[in-house]
Image (tube, rainbow, N blue to C red):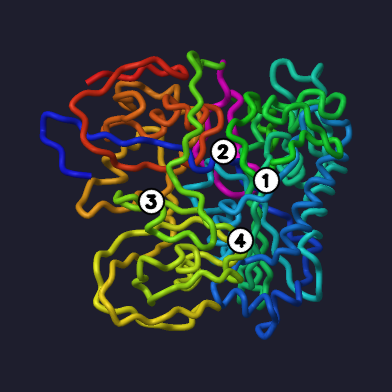
C-alpha cells in the first residue's frame, strides 16, 4: 500500500481465514504412563526420517486413531448429551501442538495462546504404547466425576471430582470443542515433575473452542442431537451433531457454552474461568459469556486468501496486486507441475510445488505466503524435499514462498501496531483474536469505518463488526492493506457502532 497523507487515515480489510476459540489447558497425571511408542523412538524409522525432512509431527494413522477415539468416546457419554459436536482434525491446532511439543517442556504453552487453546499433555517412556492410550486415560477420569444435572445448577453448576483430577475428561467431552490437533515428539532427558526421562514420547493435543469453564457442565443432558447448533442442519451421526462437510471449519460457532468449575475452590469466590491443571499458576481469566449483544447481524463469508490447485501458477492468480496467502491441497508431491529455480522461483512454476520444494509446506498441503521478487538473471535447479526443480539461464520474473506466521493478539491491538505499512508491501501474520472483545471500551478499542477500516482500529473488534468472527468464539483473521481512503463510513453491525472519519 502507498503511504498515506497526514489528513487521511489508512485502511485495511479484515477477513476470517480460520475461525476458532480454544480452551484452558490440562496437565495429565503421569501415574502408569511409563511406556513408549517404539516408532517415535527409532531414529532409523519412517517417522523419524519424515520428521527430519520437516514433515508432520504425527503420522496420518495416529492422527486418525486419536480423532476416531475422541468421537467414539464423546458419543457414548452418560448421561447422554443433547449437543455433543462431532470433532474434526484441525491442521492449525496440529501445528501449534507441534511447536509446543518440540520444546519438550512438561508444562502448558505457549503462554500467548493459553487463554485461547485447550490442551491435554501426555508423556511416557518404556515399551510400546499407542497414543490412543493417553486419550483413553483422559476419558477414564469419568469414574471420579459426577455430572451436574440442570436442577443442581442454581445458577452455577457444582464441580464434583472424587479423584486427583477430572478436567482431562471434561475437556475431551466438552460439547462445543469441535476441533482437535495433536503432535508427538521424542524428548531426550525430559524433566517430568522432577524426574528425568532419558527418552520420553511427548503427546500434545490442542482443542478448540475453549471449554472447562467454572460453573457450567461439559455438555447438555438430553436426547442425542436434540439440541445441536443450527450450523449442523439437523445432522446426527453416532450420537454426535454432524454435517457432511464437517472437515471444513464451521463459519459460525455455537452461541452457548457449557461451563464447569475445573477445581473446587478452597474459599468462596465469584465464579470465573479457572485453569484445569492442578499445580500451575492460572492464566489471565477469560470473560464469561454475556447476553447476546449482536444486532443487525452481518456474516462476512469472503475469503482473502486463495484456494489453489497443485498446478496453479502465480500468474494465474495475482493479477498485478501483491500476492497474499495460498492454501494448497494435499498430494502435490505426486503432481506433474514444473518448478523452475531454487529459493527464487520462475513465474511459470506451480505455486504449491514450489512450496514443497522450499520446505514451506509438506505433502499434506497447507497455507503459505507468496511474494513477487522482480526479475532474476537465472534460476538454479536442485532436488529438495522430493521435488526436482529445473534450471533456466534466461532473465524472468520471480517469486519466493514463506511460512505463514501466527500471532495471538489482545482486543486492543491495532493494525498499525501489528502490520506497519511498508514498501514493498509485506505479509501480515495470521492473527488470533480472543473471545468477548465486543465488551471492550470503544474509546480504547476503536472501530473506524465499514467494510474497509482505518489501521487505527482494534483488529478484533473490527473483525466482529465486519462479521468475520463471532464475539463468543474469537478466531483467526487475515489483514491486508488496501489503497488509502479519504473518508470512512460509520455503521452499526453485530453490536458495535463504528466511527466515521
Q: Nearer the viewer, residue 475 or 117?
A: 475
Q: Distance between the residues labelled 3 and 1?
A: 24 Å
Q: Distance between the residues labelled 2 and 3?
A: 24 Å
Q: Do the residues labelled 4 and 3 touch (CB within 8 Å)?
A: no
- Which of disc 4 and disc 2 is earlier in sequence? 2
The residue that label 2 is drawn on is: 21
Q: What element carries label 4?
A: loop
Q: For the residues carrying marks 1 and 4, which lies nearer the camera in this image?
A: 4
Q: Do the residues labelled 1 and 4 touch (CB within 8 Å)?
A: no
The residue that label 3 is drawn on is: 324
Q: Is residue 145 left or right of residue 413?
A: right
- Label placed on residue 148: none
Residue at image coords 25%, 75%: 395
How would you rate the neighbour count of disc 4 (Cα within 10 Å): few for under 14, some for 14-19, many for 20 or more? Answer: some
Residue at image coords 85%, 24%: 222
How would you rate the neighbour count of disc 1 (Cα within 10 Å): few for under 14, some for 14-19, many for 20 or more? Answer: few
- Magenta stretch: give its range: 270-291
- Label placed on residue 330: 4
- Which of disc 1 and disc 3 is earlier in sequence? 1
Q: Is residue 467 left or right of residue 68?
A: left
Q: For the residues carrying marks 2 and 4, which lies nearer the camera in this image?
A: 4
| On screen, residue 428 above or below 380 | above
Q: In this view, does 304 lie to the left or right of 234?
A: left
- Which of disc 3 and disc 4 is earlier in sequence? 3
- Residue 223: x and y in percent read 87, 25
Q: For the residues carrying marks 2 and 1, which lies nearer the camera in this image?
A: 1
**Quadrant of the snapshot with the C terminus:** top left
Amino acid at each position: 500500500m502507498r503511504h498515506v497523507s497526514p489528513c487521511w487515515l489508512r485502511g485495511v480489510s479484515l477477513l476470517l481465514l480460520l475461525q476458532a476459540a480454544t480452551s484452558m489447558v490440562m496437565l495429565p497425571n503421569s501415574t502408569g504412563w511409563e511406556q513408549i511408542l517404539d516408532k517415535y523412538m527409532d531414529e532409523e524409522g519412517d517417522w523419524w526420517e519424515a520428521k527430519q525432512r520437516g514433515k508432520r509431527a504425527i503420522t496420518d494413522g495416529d492422527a486418525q486413531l486419536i480423532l476416531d477415539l475422541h468421537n467414539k468416546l464423546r458419543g457414548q457419554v452418560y448421561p447422554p448429551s443433547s449437543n455433543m459436536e462431532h470433532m474434526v482434525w484441525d491442521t492449525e491446532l496440529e501445528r501449534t501442538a507441534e511447536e509446543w511439543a518440540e520444546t519438550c517442556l512438561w508444562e502448558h504453552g505457549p503462554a500467548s495462546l493459553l487463554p485461547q487453546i485447550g490442551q491435554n499433555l501426555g508423556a511416557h517412556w518404556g515399551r510400546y504404547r499407542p497414543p490412543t492410550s493417553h486419550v483413553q486415560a483422559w476419558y477414564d477420569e469419568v469414574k471420579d466425576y459426577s455430572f451436574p444435572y440442570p436442577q443442581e445448577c442454581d445458577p452455577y453448576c457444582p464441580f464434583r471430582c472424587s479423584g486427583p483430577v477430572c478436567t482431562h475428561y471434561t475437556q475431551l467431552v466438552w460439547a462445543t470443542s469441535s476441533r482437535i490437533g495433536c503432535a508427538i515428539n521424542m524428548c531426550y532427558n525430559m524433566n517430568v515433575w522432577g524426574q528425568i526421562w532419558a527418552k520420553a514420547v511427548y503427546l500434545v493435543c490442542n482443542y478448540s473452542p475453549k471449554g472447562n469453564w467454572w460453573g457450567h457442565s461439559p455438555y447438555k443432558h438430553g436426547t442425542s442431537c436434540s439440541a445441536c447448533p443450527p450450523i449442523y442442519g439437523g445432522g446426527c451421526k453416532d450420537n454426535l451433531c454432524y454435517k457432511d462437510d464437517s472437515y471444513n471449519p464451521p463459519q459460525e460457532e455455537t452461541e452457548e457454552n457449557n461451563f464447569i468449575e475445573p477445581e473446587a475452590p478452597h474459599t468462596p469466590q465469584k465464579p470465573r474461568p479457572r485453569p484445569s491443571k492442578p499445580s500451575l499458576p492460572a492464566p489471565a481469566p477469560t470473560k464469561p459469556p454475556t447476553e447476546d449483544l449482536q444486532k443487525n447481524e452481518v456474516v462476512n463469508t469472503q475469503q482473502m486468501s486463495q484456494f489453489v490447485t497443485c498446478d496453479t501458477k502465480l500468474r494465474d492468480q495475482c493479477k498485478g496486486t501483491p500476492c497474499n496467502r495460498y492454501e494448497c491441497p494435499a498430494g502435490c508431491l505426486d503432481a506433474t507441475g514444473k518448478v523452475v529455480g531454487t529459493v527464487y522461483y520462475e513465474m511459470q512454476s506451480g505455486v504449491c510445488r514450489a512450496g514443497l520444494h522450499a520446505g514451506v509446506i509438506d505433502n499434506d498441503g497447507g497455507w503459505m505466503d507468496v511474494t513477487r521478487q522482480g526479475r532474476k538473471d537465472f534460476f538454479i535447479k536442485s532436488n529438495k524435499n522430493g521435488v526436482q526443480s529445473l534450471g533456466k539461464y534466461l532473465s524472468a520474473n520471480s517469486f519466493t514462498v514463506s511460512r505463514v506466521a501466527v500471532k495471538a493478539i489482545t482486543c486492543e491491538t491495532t493494525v498499525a501496531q501489528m502490520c506497519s505499512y511498508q514498501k514493498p508491501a509485506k505479509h501480515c501474520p495470521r492473527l488470533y483474536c480472543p473471545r468477548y472483545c465486543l465488551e471492550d471500551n470503544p474509546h480504547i478499542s476503536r472501530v473506524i469505518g465499514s467494510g474497509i477500516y482505518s489501521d487505527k482500529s482494534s483488529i478484533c473488534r473490527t473483525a466482529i463488526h465486519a462479521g468475520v468472527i463471532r464475539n463468543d468464539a474469537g478466531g483467526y483473521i487475515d489483514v491486508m492493506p488496501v489503497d488509502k481512503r479519504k473518508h470512512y463510513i460509520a455503521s452499526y453491525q453485530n453490536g458495535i457502532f463504528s466511527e466515521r472519519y
